[in-house]
Amino acid sequence: MAKKVILVGGGLGGLSAAIHLAAQGIPVTLFEKNVSLGGKASEKWIGPYRFDTGPSVVTLPEVIESPFQAAGEPLDAYLTLIPIEPITHYFFADGRQLTVWRDPQKMQVALKGWGPPAYDRWQRFLQYSRRLYENAAPIFLYEPIHELGYLLRSPAFWRWKNLFLPIDPFRKMAAVNGRFFSEPALAQIANRYATYNGSDPYQAPATLNLIFWVENGIGAYYIQGGIYRLVEALEKLARKVGVEIYPDTPVRRIVTHKNHVVGVETDKGFWEAEVVVSNVDVRTTYESLLGKPPPSSVQMGEPSLSGLVFLWGVRWRSPLYHHNVFFSADYAREFSELFKEKRLPSDPTVYVAITARTDPTHAPPDGENWFVMINLPPQREPLSEAAIAELREKVVQRLQKSIGFSAPYIQEEAVLTPAHWMELGSAYGSLYGTASNRWWSAFLRPPNRSRRYRGLYFAGGSAHPGGGIPLVLLSGRHVARLIADTHFPKGKNVEGKVCE
Ligand SMILES: Cc1cc2nc3c(=O)[nH]c(=O)nc-3n(C[C@H](O)[C@H](O)[C@H](O)COP(=O)(O)OP(=O)(O)OC[C@H]3O[C@@H](n4cnc5c(N)ncnc54)[C@H](O)[C@@H]3O)c2cc1C
């Protein structure tokens, strides 16, 4: 019988792994427990309002292109990536506002009222974050860093001068940013990028400032029609390269024998395979699918932020842009509540994304589709109705204060609580796997290849290199590379022939 790979979960990381494998002629079967693929990247219509229910910002377009390149298909035959300008509009607690542009001229104008050195500082920070990205990404994102052989073969690894000090791992992000920007509001913007992988800027290494470059230097993108079009495109691509997809088919157990993977059990029976890729959260994979406690390194990983999302069909024409952030008055306190005290934020920063700004068909002419999100600490229990109502009231008040919003404008509503992400398998309702709050977090994050079970691999936000669309796509690519090299060496790139 031909060897095959079974994928558990059809999130973006799972789809990426499936495409990168099948494009090399490796037979892949994917089981997804829900009727539709995408996991956290999903879509919902409420009456005439359309929403992406998960990610709203796409970054690193070259990574988005990677599965299409692997399959030999042009990305633009499937998707249209639209750069978003301005990138984000910020509202500060003291009433000031700032529109952030990628275009340097527009940014210079925007920063005119922020003191003479503000634009110069902004540009210097961009260059600093660019250096971080160029030094760190080739190894920490683009290589499976837990695999010594792969690291040693990477030319990036041998650029020894780029290791450690020039990636600024030993200083805290917020401390660096506070010194860089004499204007605290600009430091608050820079600090916000820690949340892009669910981390705390007051604890995280300054290396995470590389995300500032990813968004403000390389750019923030949207996908025409909604982020969910990416899921649809990847599903189409996966089917085209021959991935067998079974939606609505939860895997109940990953079956092992003497520390080797032998297959999976579903409601439709047992499926034999000597290689299984879990796209399910690593902790959940161990606890629920293998029935074992996770390795201590997995247990030591600090869960990333969770979140509370309100999907509001709003009958109002607001002054907002595609991406908007309403900052809390005391960011340090907010993160202390989220990470140290592990309690609900007393003054949450509010993020509002409105795709109808770019795609007018997503809301009626007199309305807007608001994706409203606040950060929450990782959760053990579902949120109570009272807690949700209290947080909603805080959000409404914040929006009322800044832009005159009023609760009666909300015509349609749905709420996504941490329980929603838990149903997809996320331990603690974390949105991005484990946080990067320590300089060693990248090494502690679960590797793409299980150390405990031969034939078991991990793709997705809880495995290397972490959460966020481009990173989970990369995790799928890493997994495919490891599997092809280890289990299908002859089959690799052999004119699409199935490997025996
Ligand atoms: C609210 C929110 C906002 C976000 N914003 C952004 C953003 O703006 N930009 C960005 O880049 N990223 C963002 N992210 C993060 C990004 O969405 C995730 O990192 C990414 O989508 C996770 O992909 P994944 O591969 O880890 O799989 P997941 O999305 O976690 O999917 C796992 C899949 O496995 C399935 N599954 C679970 N158990 C089983 C089983 N037993 N059998 C079969 N299937 C199973 C699930 O149903 C699911 O489909 C956001 C996430 C959320 C939730």
Image (cartoon, rainbow, N blue to C red):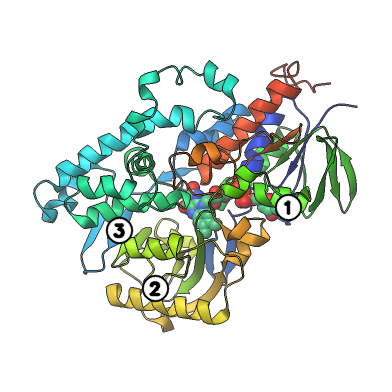
Kind of residue at badge 2: Ser
Q: Earlier in the sequence, mark 2 or mark 1?
A: 1
Can you give x and y, in whole percent of width and height, for residue 364 in the image? 47, 70
Can you give x and y, in whole percent of width and height, for residue 47 in the image? 57, 72
Spatial distance from mark 2 to mark 1, Cα to Cα?
Answer: 33 Å
From the image, which quarter does the C terminus lie in? top right
The numbered dot on residue 346 is 2
Kind of residue at badge 1: Glu
Q: 348 left or right of 250?
A: left
Labels 2 & 1 near each other (Cβ < 8 A): no
User: Which residue in the protein does label 3 denote?
Assistant: 89
* Local secondary structure at mark 1: helix
Q: Work out which residue is located at the far left of the displayed protein and give it.
A: 116
User: Which residue in the protein does label 1 denote?
Assistant: 287
Taking the spot 11% from the left edge, 46% from the top edge, the residue there is 117
* Local secondary structure at mark 2: loop
Is the distance from the Cβ of mark 3 to the nearest ligand 1 atom less than 8 Å?
A: no
- Mark 3: few/some/many CA within 10 Å (<14, 14-19, 20+): some
Taking the spot 53% from the left edge, 46% from the top edge, the residue there is 467
Can you give x and y, in whole percent of width and height, for residue 169 in the image? 37, 37
Instruction: Choose mark 3 or mark 1, whichever is in front.
Output: 1
- Mark 1: few/some/many CA within 10 Å (<14, 14-19, 20+): few
- Mark 2: few/some/many CA within 10 Å (<14, 14-19, 20+): some
Taking the spot 82% from the left edge, 32% from the top edge, the residue there is 274
